[in-house]
Image (cartoon, helix red, strand yellow):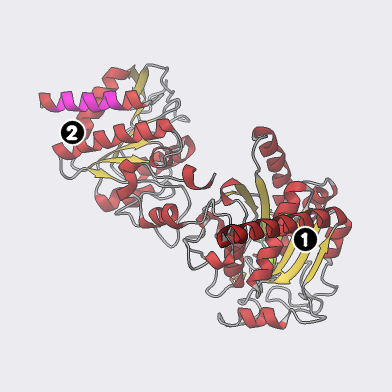
Amino acid sequence: MGNYRVLAGPEAFLPPSAACAGVVLPDPGQAHIHGEIFHEDVAMEEAAKRFLSAKVPTIFPGPMVLWNWNPKSAKKATAIKAMYDELKDHNPGALLIPMPDYRPKYPKINPEIEINPNHPNLTVWHNKIDVCMFVGVHCHQANLSLKIIRGGTNCYTIAMCAMAGHEDAMLSFRDATPDKIWKLVEVIKDVRKSL
Amino acid sequence: MGKEKIKINDEFYDIMPPEYQELVEEATYGKESRGWKDVGEAKELIEEHSLCAGCPESIAFRYVLACLPKPEDTVMVGSTGCTSLVFPHVAVHNIHSLFGNQNAIASGLKRTLALRFPEKVKDVVVLAGDGATVDIGLDMTLQSWFRQEKFTTICFDNELYANTGGQESGLMQKGFVGKMAPAGKKFDKVPLPEIARNSGCHYVAVMTVSKPNRVEKAIRNAILVAREIGPTYIQLYTPCILEIGKQMMEGLQEMRDSEGPGKRFEFKEYVSDEAKVFLDEMDAERKRKKKALRAARAK
Ligand SMILES: Cc1ncc(C[n+]2csc(CCOP(=O)(O)OP(=O)(O)O)c2C)c(N)n1
Ligand code: SF4
Ligand SMILES: [Mg+2]
């Protein structure tokens, strides 16, 4: 692994992908924090702390969990909503902003109510989001968005990825299932109690 | 299938932007009688378009979408040009292909869908401009017809390269001077409908989009024949009002002026013998159903 660390930006107009900078993906059961590999439990705690100490913690659900296209997506939706409710209970400023699809919207998106992978920075800036989590976004679009956010904003990004994880997030889980999302909800509750 | 695959998870319904809620509530997926009359009534499958105001392509696009027999099981293939500005707003699966490649992409797509979903009907519909269909993509267009690929090709014929500022296209009429074709077209409009017929298309239609009933019938015929028999082709005159110097309210009149007897876009239809048998059977079946429905109501 190189020396590059995936940190909150703004990094550059067009930052290199973290993979190009030598960041590798975690193996099953692991996660990465800033590009370093940890046991998934460690990352769960770190994600919970980041969320709970944020001014505007935000979850960005993507098409794969917004749309009820199979039973798994419905289960994930329930878990994600529970996570949001927990965050909102802790901090009324918490947000839940959808990325319904990936089309380049004209003439512009409404950054208050949605996020678009082609200019995710608009939504982050507009709502002053300092910690966010992507979930249910197809990998290619998530990578694109995560890179743009890292490039142009100071937002801390977390990816709850259903595949192999995202180097371009500051913290990434892999193999997300409804159970894994529920586990993070529980960890958030536990960490909250200990605050 | 209809709408059951196009549902929002309950937890997120209230945070979805309104256009998605409307799409799920009101769009005409799964409605057997869908057609051009749904435009403006039901939620359209185009959310908004970024064409010039009054561009006839925009209404033609709406008719095409409204007339797809099974939008939820249709994949459209587009190409570069003014139409490609609309595709990102279309709530039907679509693929943007490299300029001119649309019929090659559609060939592979149709075959793959048939292998992947043998138990389902999946329609593939190409929608591209005249530059893409007749000039840069002519090879792909013709080869797909020669090979009897089972999908529909729709050409939005505005008789020039609109998206790049008005260069000459094969479908431009002889003598026309474009903004970027100052010398004037030196040869005749390519007779693509005749070429389509001779290249193996089973249903060919040429028209303007001034008469939505006619457009609807042609689109349905073309897609159903392509599904069952082989390639079909529709050429629609969608004048580029910007390049021919018309105002935004003048598109319809321009189409009407171009479709009279002997004019470039006089309605023409060709149906192969095989397709004719199929369409006649379908028509008879439709009439039978209607009659049965009427009889049942009368009881
Ligand atoms: C391979 C390739 N060659 C050239 C272009 C440039 N180009 C973009 S749109 C266009 C003309 C499109 O004309 P047409 O297919 O008639 O569509 P219209 O815009 O008129 O609807 C051209 C040449 C391109 N995008 N890609
Ligand atoms: S340039 Fe012509 S074809 Fe393109 S959107 Fe404008 S009027 Fe329509
Ligand atoms: Mg054209």
Res B203 quadrant in image: bottom right
For mark 2, name the chain.
A
Q: Within 8 Å: ligand 1 and the Cβ of disc 1? A: no
**Ligand 3 is located in which of the four quadrants?**
bottom right
Above or below — where is B134 with respect to A60? below
Position of A15 compared to B132: left or right?
Answer: left
Res B195 quadrant in image: bottom right
SS for dot 1: helix
Q: Which residue is mark 2?
A: A52
Read off the magenta span: A182-192
Is residue A11 visible in the rendered image? The answer is no
Mark 2 residue type: Leu
Mark 1 residue type: Val
Q: Looking at the image, which residue is at 83% across and 67% down?
A: B190
Q: Looking at the image, which residue is at 14% across and 28% down?
A: A192
The image shows residue B72 at horizontal and vertical percentages of: 56, 48
Q: Which residue is mark 1?
A: B134
Distance of label 1 from label 2 (alpha carbons): 59 Å
Dot 2 crowding, Cα within 10 Å, few <14, some 14–19, many 20+: many
**Residue B46 shown in magenta:** no
Pick the front one: B133 or B61: B61
Q: Main secondary structure of the magenta part?
A: helix
Above or below — where is B294 with respect to B96? below
